[in-house]
Image (cartoon, rainbow, N blue to C red):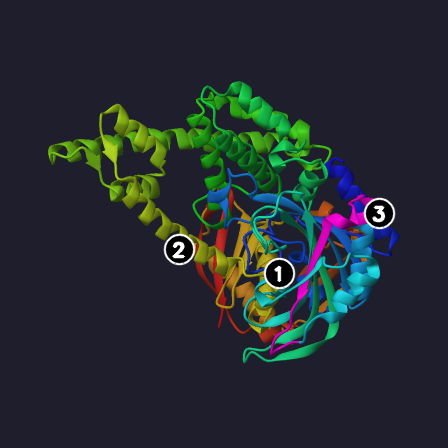
Amino acid sequence: MKAIEIRNKYLEFFKKHGHVVIPSAPLIPENDPSVLFNTAGMQPLVPYLLGQKHPEGTRLTDYQKCVRTNDIDEVGDNRHLTYFEMLGNWSLGDYFKEESIAMSFEFLTKELGIPVEKIFVTVFAGDEDCMRDELAAECWKKAGILDGHIYYYGKDDNWWIAGEEGPCGPDTEMYYDTGKEPCGPHCEPHCDCGKYVEIWNNVFMEYFKTKEGKYTKLQQRNVDTGLGLERMTMLLQGKETPFDTEIFKPIMDKLEKLQQIDSIESRRIIAEHLRSSMMIISDGGRPSNVDRGYVLRKLIRRMIRHMNKLQIDLNKVEELVELNINTLKEMYPELEKNKNIIKQTIMEEKDKFVKTLNNGEKEFTKAMNKTKQEGKDKIEGAVVFKLYDTFGFPPEITKDLAEENNMKIDMQEFEVLFKKHQEKSRQGSSAKFKGGLAEQNEMTIKYHTATHLLNAALKIVLGKDTHQRGSNITTERMRFDFNCNHKLTDEEKQQIEELVNKWIKDELDVTVQTMKKDDAIKSGAECMFIEKYPEDVTVYTIGTVSKELCGGPHVKNTRELGTFKIKKEESSSAGVRRIKAVLI
């Protein structure tokens, strides 16, 4: 069964069970302050999981495009992916455990045809905070799960929460038995030996954890589920890795023909990073030195690095992009629509990286000569790391150049420094990617409303063709990207500030209504990625100055915002400027 067939079966199944199919949100989130990319199906639905009414009702299903960056350096093995697709279904205060579990079991066994003996499940074991989830276990038995196929695990395995406080609850995970031999007498679903592969996770949001660590029952209980499409495709096709499925096979075969040196790891990295880069660019991402732009730059450059390693002509990148578009266009028609900008962006970044490699070689030569002058034949790991960290020069290329000059490099020292760097990056990513539910608070809601006023002010000062290109919000500040081909003058910044503060002082009401998408656009409402919105949309209006399609939440009146102050204005990428501002 092909990936797109699995996706369609999933959406049709839940549609038959009363769910409305909603479109995937873009990879670049509009309203979630906590992340660079959408990392899970629940993220675009945060306001509705917190109680806001969704225009399409209480039963929803979709496929969500996702990017997770914590494991970029692990890509190349047989399982890690940066970009992936998550299938999901949600109950917003509607059904709960029994119906959710029954539908999951029916879909796996009837729609996908997975033998019941291959399905194992895990549920929450209970602790001093919350009781053992016997109800979920009973629901599984009633659905038809076999005796001995239910396991109980603690909070580390079967509990979900975003951050330290907020909505949370037990989850139940479904595993597929690959048929491999058990690793020992105690081989169970949570074992990482590869016998059992997790395929689906249903989260039952029924508690709220306070800052003090106390758990109370939520008024609105939700179900949030996630099924990884690439993994399910791999298992149903009996493949060892996602790279053996039709999603990747054409590009993997092409790389094998083009390569001069054989490396399955490098081919996987090129194939994965190419797809991820194309999806990010298609959804509006552009390479830069910060945040999501930096992630995209790293993906493209890592891909180019491994093309170099396989001695593939770098001009073949354009051909690889074309092949991938043909392979994936049925699943993602937007790739064909955005073909030119995808090609242009990747080729330009490739050319920049070639220059980086040339500069790195010059720095290497300096470091090598210095080492020789000191009477040594081994280049220090700190030098190798500096070449990597400061100049973007790959350590394997440093190693190759050293060997060509009858020298060695201290890889052991480099690995120590690299691991420290990796850990620091992961800690930073964890802060960024901890999830939206915990970040929706009074201050971020104020900043979210302020972005609408800023957007409106920019249109007056710079022109009506000025549009939002992205935003990022924390409890301390807001950041707003917009199309503009010049640095703002002091006068322009002052005009923008004065407009926003005038509207705050005018105490404008913020109203919300649900309407048809076409009617919202006809009424003058603005939004990013209009094609990604469902037919029924939520429109927020601020007095007579702003009307936008948005998921919310917002303040009730602009007087709640305080005083708006621009702290910095700078370039974000070509043709895009960035404003950092605070409310005081």
Mark 2 vs mark 3: which is more N-terminal?
3
Q: Position of residue 235 (x, y in %)?
A: 69, 41
Numbered label attached to residue 424: 2
Q: Quadrant of residue 220?
A: bottom right
Q: Position of residue 460 (x, y in %)?
A: 59, 55
Q: Secondary structure at mark 1?
A: helix
Q: At label 2, which amino acid type do we have?
A: Lys
Residue that mark 3 sits on: 110
CB-based contact (under 8 Å), mark 2 and mark 3 = no
Mark 3 crowdedness (10 Å alpha carbons): few <14, some 14-19, many ≥20: few
Mark 2 crowdedness (10 Å alpha carbons): few <14, some 14-19, many ≥20: few
Mark 1 crowdedness (10 Å alpha carbons): few <14, some 14-19, many ≥20: many
Q: Position of residue 173 (x, y in %)?
A: 68, 57
Q: CA distance from mark 3 to mark 1?
A: 47 Å
Q: CA distance from mark 1 to mark 2?
A: 34 Å
**Front of the two marks 2 and 3:** 3
Q: Which residues are magenta?
A: 109-130
Q: Is residue 100 above or below residue 166?
A: above
Q: Position of residue 92 (x, y in %)?
A: 76, 65
Q: Is residue 28 above or below residue 132?
A: above
Mark 1 vs mark 2: which is more N-terminal?
2
Mark 3 vs mark 1: which is more N-terminal?
3
Q: CA distance from mark 2 to mark 3?
A: 46 Å
Q: Secondary structure at mark 2?
A: helix
Q: Is residue 455 above or below residue 179?
A: below
Q: Residue at x 54, y 30 (%)?
A: 344
The one of 109 and 210 positioned closer to us in this rendering: 109
Q: Residue at x 35, y 52 (%)?
A: 420
Residue that mark 1 sits on: 452
**Front of the two marks 1 and 2:** 2
227 vs 351, left or right, is: right
